[in-house]
Image (tube, rainbow, N blue to C red):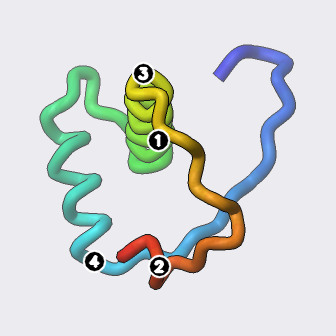
Amino acid sequence: MKAGKKTEQLHMMADLAFLSSIDEWRAKQRPILTRSEAIRVLVLKGIALDVRRKRPSLPTSLSQGELGV
């Protein structure tokens, strides 16, 4: 993160399979990222991919069940 940039804490619940997937991915990265940094990188990569494909954003009203997660 850039120095002086305001940040907020985010708490989330995740099952062990999700966390294992994150940990496996980050173990392949050099340097090895923290779990928090790995999640930030993966989210930013997903957003960038979505923007490049010019897909419409999902409505904020969708629940986790509707997203299949």
x 70%, y 16%: residue: 2
The residue tagged 4 is 16
Distance between the alpha carbons at the discs numbered 1 and 3: 14 Å
Closer to us: mark 4 or mark 2? 2
Distance between the alpha carbons at the discs numbered 2 and 3: 24 Å
- Kindly indicate whether the residue at mark 3 contacts the one at mark 1 (C-beta within 8 angstroms): no
Closer to us: mark 1 or mark 2? 2
x 42%, y 75%: residue: 14
The residue tagged 1 is 43
The numbered dot on residue 3 is none
Q: Secondary structure at mark 1?
A: helix
Q: Position of residue 62 (x, y in %)?
A: 60, 72
x 27%, y 22%: residue: 31
The numbered dot on residue 52 is 3
Q: Nearer the viewer, residue 1 or 62?
A: 62
In the rendered structure, the answer to whether residue 20 lies left or right of residue 33 reads: left
First along the sequence among labels 2 and 3: 3
Q: Where does the C terminus fall, quadrant-wise? A: bottom left
Q: Position of residue 23 (x, y in %)?
A: 24, 53
The residue tagged 2 is 66
In this rendering, is residue 26 above or below 20?
A: above
Residue 8 in view (yes/no): yes
First along the sequence among labels 1 and 3: 1
